[in-house]
Amino acid sequence: MWGGRFGSGPDPIMEDINASIDFDRQLYRQDIAASKAHAAMLAKKGIIAAQDAKRIAHGLDTILSEIESGKFAFKRALEDIHMNVESRLAELIGPAAGRLHTARSRNDQVATDFRLWLRDAIDEIDGALAAFQRALARKALDHAATVMPGLTHLQPAQPVTFGHHLLAYVEMAARDRGRFANARARLNECPLGSGALAGTSFPIDRAMTAKALGFARPTANSLDAVADRDFVLETLSACAITAVHLSRLAEEIVIWSSPLTGLIRLSDKFTTGSSMMPQKRNPDAAELVRAKTGRVVGALTGLFVVIKALPLAYQKDLQEDKEGAIDAIGALALSLTAMTGMVGDMEPDAARMAAAAAEGYSTATDLADWLVRTLKLPFREAHHLTGRIVAKAAEAGVALDKLSLKTMQAIEPRITKSVFDALSVANSVKSRKVYGGTAPSNVRRQAQRWLKRLGKKTGKETAKKP
Ligand code: ARG
């Protein structure tokens, strides 16, 4: 494809280090679509003959079906997807194939292909995130009033509802989707026509190819278009944040499903046994989601280092943008599907959750608030008195609501028995009706709002990436 000025062939190690076909073959659909758009435009502008464009399009369609039916012979000697396709095109249609690369370089070609590939990947991830949100919101609605221990510093802090906790992840996923949408909007410009780096002297119509491929517009600077990969960095950043979010829920599932806490149960569908210890039910899927975060963050970090200090314009270093990104997107898509499955599968042990929610004097803040509300004490003073009451309870080895009124009155004589209403876990969550708070009525409303907003399954969600 480029051997005109070369005397001998490359050293075998050159093929090993140079070839990208082992991973960029995954861009075949995008590569063929971009070539078809380019050929059609060349014909429309009279740069190649209409007859040749027709042959090219037909040949490309044949190649597409060859690849999809597994009949295509990928060759490492042909380096990458672009040259594999073009070489096969020459076999299929003869000399007309050689006209396809008019006014084009692999540099603008690969930048176009990868933008198209990432755009599809983003759409797939967005659908998977929506399905994840839907599973969370459904479970949240079922458990709008199921109380669980709310933790800070992993210590019992205040009771919350399980539904409220799950909806926290719906919010995170919504922001994740926003980041993907932003990345998608910015990457949606077409590099075709940038050539190797300087543009082209042929009278091409860049708006036409951009439009044919669903891009919002052509890129405005040819050097930037072939040299930059911030569209990959940005997408990977969104992936990394999403993966980190998933890892937090994965970790919580591991903690909650451990018999040490016993807050939830995963069914046989999402647990595995041990080959030695017959009693085990291990949350492997959650652990692997937690771990796959490493790949995703690693791909982002790796690409930052590749691009750092890279002079303009295209450098072969940029070929290293794809392997990590493709792997990271795959890992994230898989993690999302596994998490959606686990969220639907997990069932809280409501009695255990309620008992755990009451442990650790978790309604102490409610007692302090009662003192503020009923006795009009300043909060600081109420906090101090409550601390003394908690100390008494700890001394007696009982929960706050098991302390006698007398003991409390010894610390603050104006306390009446209505204080006990404030000490129940159910009343504690019920009272937190502030917008964004954990009250079951809020959680129910928010879960319903999300379910309505998320609507029915979209086509996108079920679409499979090649
Ligand atoms: N496989 C290459 C890549 O992924 C395609 C571009 C090659 N360009 C070049 N000038 N050798 O970056």
Image: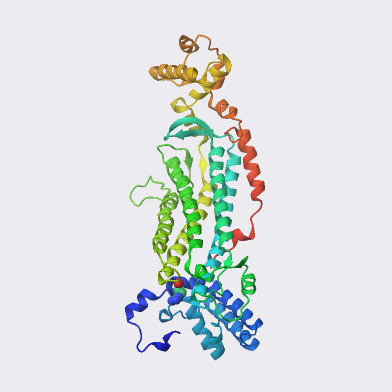
Q: How far from the left and from the top, in percent, is residue 391?
A: 41, 18
Residue 229: x and y in percent read: 48, 64
Q: Position of residue 205 (x, y in %)?
A: 63, 76
Expressed as whole percent of the image width and height from the top left, the position of residue 230 reads 49, 61
- Quarter of the rendering containing residue 76: bottom left
Ligand 1 quadrant assignment = bottom left
Q: Is residue 96 left or right of residue 241?
A: right
Counting every numbered tag in the picture gives 0
Colour scheme of this structure image? rainbow
- In the image, taking residue 217 as reference, residue 240 lies left or right, namely left
For residue 216, side relative to residue 238 (left or right): right
Q: Is residue 72 visible?
A: no
Q: Which residue: 53% across, 84% down?
A: 89
**Which quarter of the picture shows residue 309?**
bottom left
Does 322 sit above or below residue 75?
above
Is residue 4 visible to us here? yes
What residue appears at the point 64 percent right and 72 percent down from the top-left corner? Answer: 207
Q: From the viewer's perspective, is residue 280 above or below residue 462?
A: above
**Which one is in front, 49 or 421?**
49
In the picture, the quarter occupied by the N terminus is: bottom left
Residue 292: image quadrant is: bottom left
